[in-house]
Amino acid sequence: MPLGSICVTIETQSSGREAPAMVLDTPLQSFPGVGPAKAKALAKLGLETVGDLLTYWPRAYEDRTKIYLIAQAPEAEPVCVSALVAETPSVSYIRKGLNITKCRIVDGSGAAQAVFFNQDYVRRALRAGESYIFYGRVEGAGNRRQLTNPVFEREDRIRFTGRIMPVYPLTAGVSNNLLAGLALRCVEDCAGLLPDELPGAVRQEHTLCTMEYACQNLHFPVDQEALALARRRAVFEELFTLSCGMAFLRSRRAALTGQVFPGRAVEEFLKLLPFVPTGAQKRAMEELLADLTSGRAMNRLIQGDVGSGKTAVAAFAAWLAHAGGFQSAMMAPTEILAHQHYETLRELLAPAGIKVGLLTGSLTSTEKKTMYASLESGFIDLAVGTHALLSEKVGYQNLGLVITDEQHRFGVGQRSALSSKAQNQPHVLVMSATPIPRTLALLIYGDLDVTIIDELPPGRTPVETYLVGEDKRQRMYGFVRKQVAEGRQVYIICPAVEEGEAGELKAVTAFARELSEQVFPDLRVAFVHGKLKSKDKEAVMSAFARGEVDVLVSTTVVEVGVDVPNASLMVIENAERFGLSQLHQLRGRVGRGRWQSYCVLISDNRAPETRERLRYFCQTTDGFKIAEKDLELRGPGDFFGQRQHGLPVLRAADLAGDTRVLKEAQQAAEALLRADPALADPENRPVMEKIRRLFREEGDIFN
Ligand code: ADP
Ligand code: MG
């Protein structure tokens, strides 16, 4: 839509009958230019009323404040020029579906050609002899300067040029100009009506601007400084609400009564273990014992680096549950992992008379039925499985403990879905091998108590890590051979599954073929990736675990939790493609046995940031340090993949850039809840309402 026409439509409206005053509840459909179809498209963005639009923040901005002379306009980015239209635009019809409108424009410094593709309305919209502001990229030198498809407005009616212009997230049928036009009207009339939901004391203490100012300057910032102030307020408010929500959940959970498990001595359990526990494992067990016998419902996260021995700690909790006559359930994110846990726990707990069952999606329906029956009758004491444990058909006789492994893959909602299978509030134990920077941990796990296992079992030597280029490929193959000759096994990780999927990247299927046919015809090479059927995946993984495969070519599906102590070498192809935390997870697959282990990163990428990242990885084995660095370098994407975190979507905050505000918001939230734990003070009630709205998608966790 040409910008000019928006002005016209709005003018016609105000010339008519006096329109009723606009309020936050005014439907957007009552605006001229918004018919039923547009209203429907807007609703897809969650925009139905003036109030919705006012809190719909732009995702970016275009700085259209500076006006350049045509001769001096830089080519690199779009800019504004103020110029006179020198002639009536001419339209040439090139072929069906393509016409070009052109006209010369001039200012004191020179002239340029304005060119429009398929916008023949421009012929009438641009009048010869009038001055306009054009916004676009000025290309070409000297008298061949050209602007292609610029935005323009008559100089005496500018709205969207000469200012910082908001760029909104869009959907089909909703243009940025439509939103900006609506926002301009709404902000002018209604920004002052938005309730200020931050308690006044918090706003003052953290020097945050008012809601009105924030709203005005998030949509149409006066200048960059005003935008920064406005953004700070919006980001703070969002993170503050989230932090309050998590802290609130946590305090409410802390008040729940829980089953009392018997106070058996940890030593009794330790007799079952084939090894001496580390100090950290013992401390974790003591903490669990205290929780589980306290009479309050436990909600605890155990965070420990890969290989730190979390399974034994979980086994202790299940053992204690059994001693108290309760069943336990343990949920893992993949079938492979569920299977491995099942094997480990069955062996470990059998001498104590604990019956362990496995429930995954790939069981036959008869097998599943048998499992359902055994869980319901209480025959099985510990159910290990995947998401299948969440199925409606699963019921327990008396579920007392819920364990989820590799928690970052499950959301808050799924965690509570599993808990809801119990008649009474079960104890909840969450295990994560992803070291998460403290600030983020508070957000993701803010509703849990945290135990950190910061010690590896003795005798583990750190994995030696090297970064090499393609020129060392033959030497690397020699090294693979040497490891296999010594009886060890090797992982080779590729970033892609199929050839051509991502250009030059090593792809699992093709590379595995090349290795087995040309490079290692005498070795047993197999491959696995996420697109295989889970039965096939399982078969390959278990063959590898049994030592029947020498070299396993794989995508990152091996990233999670798989335990093959005999594997001593991990080669990572196109290492530049992986984030630090992911590399750390991958490397954790080796160095789990008594052999010196190695990790070889292959990358020819020369970008300095990449070199820095990969070198840092070679020198560091501490998962928490790596996680901090990852957050600093790449942002929180790896920690918050595709809403796996189960947190509400953040609209203003960018967790990587805003960690300082995050810390401040967390402190403010803690202080507020200390003073008013139920958020019952009238001034704090809006915060409670906001929490409810923010977590709305998470179902009923606040009820
Ligand atoms: P993670 O924390 O990654 O889940 P696991 O529980 O799978 O670690 O343990 C990794 C390996 O270390 C397993 O083979 C386990 O038997 C072994 N292990 C765990 N604790 C100890 C210990 N204290 N001493 C020796 N080996 C241990
Ligand atoms: Mg584990």
Image (cartoon, rainbow, N blue to C red):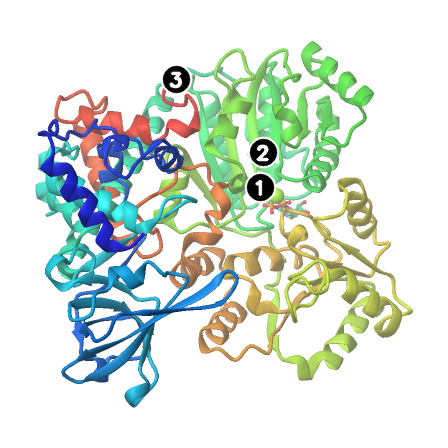
Spatial CA distance of label 2 from label 3 is 22 Å
Quadrant, the C terminus: top left
| Residue 238 at x, y percent in the picture | 27, 40
- Across and down, in percent, residue 145 comes to 31, 82
Question: Is the CB–ligand 1 distance for label 2 below 8 Å?
Answer: no
Q: Is residue 615 left or right of residue 217?
A: right
Q: Residues within 10 Å of mark 3 (few under 14, many from 20)?
A: few
Q: Residues within 10 Å of mark 1 (few under 14, many from 20)?
A: many
Q: With respect to residue 621, does 374 lie above or below?
A: above
Q: Residues within 10 Å of mark 2 (few under 14, many from 20)?
A: many
Q: Which mark is residue 310?
A: 1
Identify the mark nearer the N-term, 2 or 3.
Answer: 3
Q: On screen, 299 above or below 569? A: above
Considering every residue shown, the one lying at the far right of the view is 522
Give the residue at mark 2.
314
Q: What residue does disc 3 label?
A: 256
- For ligand 2, the image quadrant comes to top right
